[in-house]
Amino acid sequence: MDEYQIVERVKDWYREGELAWYCLLPNGNRISSIPSPSYHQSNKQAQISERIIGLVYLIGIDDYSITTFEFPMLDNIMDIVDLYIYKRGFVLPDEPYGPYPLPNLKYFICGARHKNRLAVELIDLDVVGNNLNLFKIMSSVLGAKLLSDEIIEDDDLDEIRLQVLSQKLFDGHTWDDADDIVFRYFDKNERDLSKEVLKISEAYQQVIRPYRVVYNTKTWQAVLF
């Protein structure tokens, strides 16, 4: 199943009115899905976690802010960091994605709906992790624990997140500053920020590399790739 087919499946969940986390698992030439509660109940011996190739987060069935519609991943940096950590063989203390690593995790998919449009973005965690310097940051924070521990403690997690957020990857802006600028432009109508928003948008494409499809929610046909 290619990226477009995965995004099409996510669109169908929105169309059916679903709102949840989903885990994606390969099933021959197709992709099977399992909702988060069932995943946590069924994954007793890591049989499922070892097979998961993607995590889907459906933000909202009702209208969301236009900023989130335009940049779904800006609001989900913590999820990106946490999923990458699981992918690298670690587990977080509160086990948000279960008690076992997700070694074959490849995709994070997120969508946001605004008025009669739905934007779905799919990212490759290896690509984004590399662009966010995540493994280098993990190595600098964890040191020898990178090879000996499986659970990342809260203090180490906070430091990893802080270092990721403090990078000025969006035309000289940090992640939070970029999020604030695009919010002021789209939701507060501060149109004098147009040049900055254009540069942030270009940087977003370079850093996140999203595969993006926009659907008309009246016809459920793709209107923009």
Image: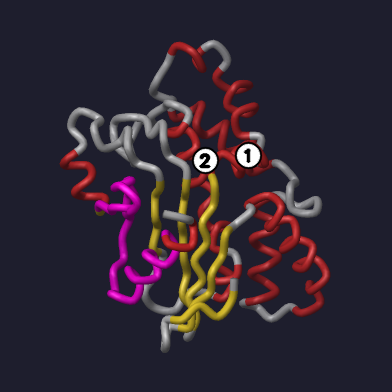
Identity of the residue drawn at 46% across and 81% down? 221
Question: Magenta part of the protein: which range?
Answer: 6-34
Q: Quadrant of residue 56?
A: bottom left
Q: Nearer the viewer, residue 75 or 155?
A: 75
Reply above or below: 82 against 159: below
Residue 188 drawn in magenta:
no
Question: Between disc 1 and disc 2, whose residue precedes?
Answer: 2
Identity of the residue drawn at 67% across and 41% down? 131
Q: Quadrant of residue 35?
A: bottom left
Please tell me the numbered disc located at residue 199. Answer: none
Residue 16 lies, in percent from the top left, at 28, 75
Identity of the residue drawn at 56% across and 39% down? 126
Residue extending furthest toward the front: 29
Q: Residues within 10 Å of mark 1 (few under 14, many from 20)?
A: many
Tag 1 and tag 2, C-beta contact below 8 Å: yes
Q: Is residue 196 left or right of residue 75?
A: right
Residue 10 drawn in magenta:
yes
Reply above or below: 24 against 99: below
Per the image, label 1 sits on a secondary structure element best described as helix
- What residue does disc 2 label? 81
Residue 66 lies, in percent from the top left, at 57, 76
Q: Quadrant of the N terminus?
A: bottom left
Q: Residues within 10 Å of mark 2 (few under 14, many from 20)?
A: many
Q: Quadrant of residue 46?
A: top left
Per the image, label 2 sits on a secondary structure element best described as helix
Reply above or below: 86 against 127: above
- What residue does disc 1 label? 164
Residue 33 lies, in percent from the top left, at 28, 53
Residue 86 lies, in percent from the top left, at 42, 33
Identity of the residue drawn at 43% across and 26% down? 89
Q: Nearer the viewer, residue 46 or 161?
A: 46
Cα separation between marks 1 and 2: 8 Å
